[in-house]
Amino acid sequence: MTTAIVRATLDDAPARIAEALALVNYRPRKEAIFIKPNVPDYGPPQQGLYTDPRVVEGLLQAFAGRPIVIGEGGIVGCDTMAAFQRTGYTELARRYGAELVDLNKVERMEVAWEFGTLRLPTLLRTHEYINVAKMKTHVQTGVTLGLKNQKGLLLPGDKRSFHRRNLNACIRALGQVARPALTVIDGIIALEGNGPWRYGTPKPMSLLVVGTDLIEVDNVCLRIMGFPPAHAPHIPPRSTVEVVGLPIEEVARPFAFDYQGFFRYKNVYEHITDSCSGCNWTLYHTVKLIKASRWRRLKFAYRGIWRRLDIVMGHAAELEGLPPGHGKVVCVGDCAREYAARYGLPLARGCPPQAEDVVKLL
Ligand code: SF4
């Protein structure tokens, strides 16, 4: 297998996509195309948060004349079509006559996998599947690239089950049953630090990484980002990779990975355990609610800065007893229900819970 690395900007992305496709000698075998970008939610443009529509535009141009579906499932609780609208995908699809679909609402087929049966979109069978991921760090999986992007293919219940089992093992196993014919990684403006959300830091890399072997593409990106294989246990390591275009050594720049928590206050401790994006996203909105009100800011300053606050999310299986040196301990999300009951702690119920309910507990 061979992976292509090419330089690209947002202006010339479509032309660079064509160049990369030629380098890996890619031609779709099926007539209809299914493109799965990484648009987990909306956010400000060009901050490294989602696959830039210009990258997908390159594919729409390369495969003009074919029926093309662009689909995403988003994070649990996200309105996929609103995310498409606010990130420019609705307009892009309109211009090229592509169909936009919310993967939470498409027909599914049952597929046997390592942990039983998984319900995957039938689009994977009827269409040529192209995975168009973003190059980002991720607080739980180390990085999010092609393999991790496939989690957006799942229904919300199956996404949650990944967190209840073993997130890294499930993403790896998903890679054995969902196999894209082509993987494109948008590293034009990547994200480092506290990714994958807005607490990450945009990192302009001006790169596209393209290949037909999903695992090799992710291994190439991991090297470009300067991480050892152990940093991303969901990616099966490859001791050797074949690269065309630019050599890895020429484009590699180490990514920062310095997760400090969503709150970043002196005496607030987050125990995110195996929580998924849903609860992490709730915390993000919690911060926004606190910042929007003077009274809440004062209350939070007292509780979380002058005193100490511990927030537990996920099943907390690895927490032995209460967090060491804890202050007030608050549990967030249904996954933490048992832990909360065991220690008589306040719990914001829901999957994911409402940010308003979390605020009330702080
Ligand atoms: S409770 Fe939170 S961590 Fe658990 S599955 Fe729901 S959203 Fe994810």
Image (cartoon, rainbow, N blue to C red):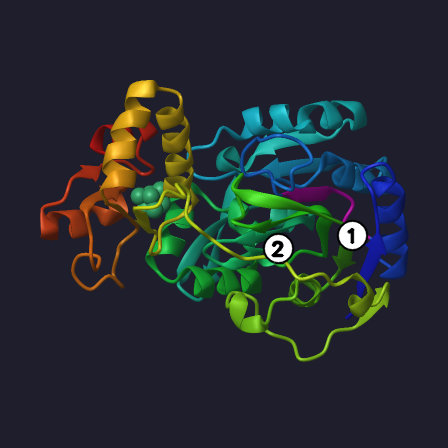
Determine contact: label 1, label 2, CB under 8 Å.
Answer: no
Residue 33 on the magenta span: yes
- Vertical position of residue 348 compared to residue 152: above or below: above
- Residue 362: image location, x then y, percent: 24, 34
Neighbor class of circle 2 (other Cα within 10 Å; few <14, some 14-19, many 20+) is many
Give 323 or 207, whichever is nearer the viewer: 323
Quadrant where the N terminus is found in the figure: bottom right
Q: Which image quadrant shows ligand 1?
A: top left
- Residue 191: image location, x then y, percent: 62, 48
Helix, strand or loop at label 1? It is strand
The residue positioned 59% from the left and 72% from the top of the image is 228
Locate residue 110 relative to residue 296 in the image: left or right. Answer: right
Locate residue 150 relative to residue 356 in the image: left or right. Answer: right
Give 225 or 297, whichever is nearer the viewer: 297
Q: Quadrant of residue 311?
A: top left
Give, as a single range, the part of the protein colored magenta: 28-37
The residue positioned 50% from the left and 60% from the top of the image is 171
> Which circle, 1 or 2, is nearer the viewer?
1
Residue 95 on the magenta span: no
Point out the residue furthest to the bottom here: 239
Locate residue 271 relative to residue 211 in the image: left or right. Answer: left
Whole-angstrom CA distance, mark 1 to mark 2, is 13 Å
Residue type highlighted by circle 2: Leu
* Residue that label 1 marks: 207
- Vertical position of residue 14 compared to residue 99: above or below: below
* Residue that label 2 marks: 145
The residue positioned 68% from the left and 43% from the top of the image is 34
The residue positioned 54% from the left and 31% from the top of the image is 80
Helix, strand or loop at label 2? It is loop
Q: Quadrant of residue 324?
A: bottom left
- Residue 121: image location, x then y, percent: 55, 45
Labelled disc at residue 92: none
